[in-house]
Image (cartoon, rainbow, N blue to C red):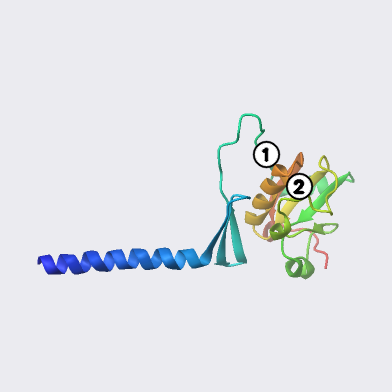
Amino acid sequence: MKTSTKLIIAGTTIGVVVAGALIAKHFINVDRENQAVQIIGGADGPTSVFLAGKVPADRKQAEYTSITMEEAKEVFATSGNYIILDVRRADEFAEGHIPGAINVANEDIGAEQPAELPDLDQVIFVYCRSGRRSKEASAKLAALGYTNIYEFGGILDWDGEIEK
């Protein structure tokens, strides 16, 4: 292969990489305070990805518990002092949700405790559409100090009654 051909290929490769970085910068927003990256244009709208970092020794790692849909259904079959939290958007919630659920969109959970969830020790069962946003929301709630968070996936796997 000629030297000139190699230089053209190398120049083109560098150009593509630079163009990709510029395009990515346009579609990705970084929130350094909350350590989140928001990628514009996900299938469900903007997608937030939370950056994992080392937790200082004086702070406890925020935790939540993942359970199966069947385990959640067993709990919901009993009366108890718990909240079922749907973290989908309001329009998705209006299309149908698990009976008795309340709605606080994942995107609305930030650095402040949601008004709908005043008790940090309340048992809260979290779900979304497929399970991705429920994991994000559960991690954010745990980081806010909620102590009894149970994430159980998405309504796509729910075979029980739906309320509209």
| Looking at the image, residue 34 lies above or below residue 96 | above
Crowding around mark 2 (Cα neighbors within 10 Å: few <14, some 14 to 19, many 20+) is: some
Q: Residue 143 or 26: which is nearer the viewer?
A: 26
Q: Position of residue 29 (x, y in %)?
A: 55, 61
Q: Residue 93 or 59: which is nearer the viewer?
A: 59
Q: Quadrant of the C terminus?
A: bottom right
Left or right of residue 38, residue 104 in this image? right
| Looking at the image, residue 100 lies above or below residue 123 | below
Pointer 1 residue? 62
Residue 132 image label: none
Label 2: element kind = helix
Q: Position of residue 42 (x, y in %)?
A: 57, 66
* Sequence order check, earlier mark of 1 and 2: 1
Q: Position of residue 27 (x, y in %)?
A: 51, 66
Q: Position of residue 132 (x, y in %)?
A: 62, 55
| Looking at the image, residue 98 lies above or below residue 80 | below
Rounded to the nearest angstrom, the CA distance separating label 1 from label 2 is: 21 Å
Residue drawn at point x = 55 percent, y = 41 percent: 53
Residue drawn at point x = 69 percent, y = 41 percent: 64
Kind of residue at badge 2: Ala
Left or right of residue 26, residue 13 in this image? left
Tag 1 and tag 2, C-beta contact below 8 Å = no
Pointer 2 residue? 72
Q: Is residue 48 visible?
A: yes
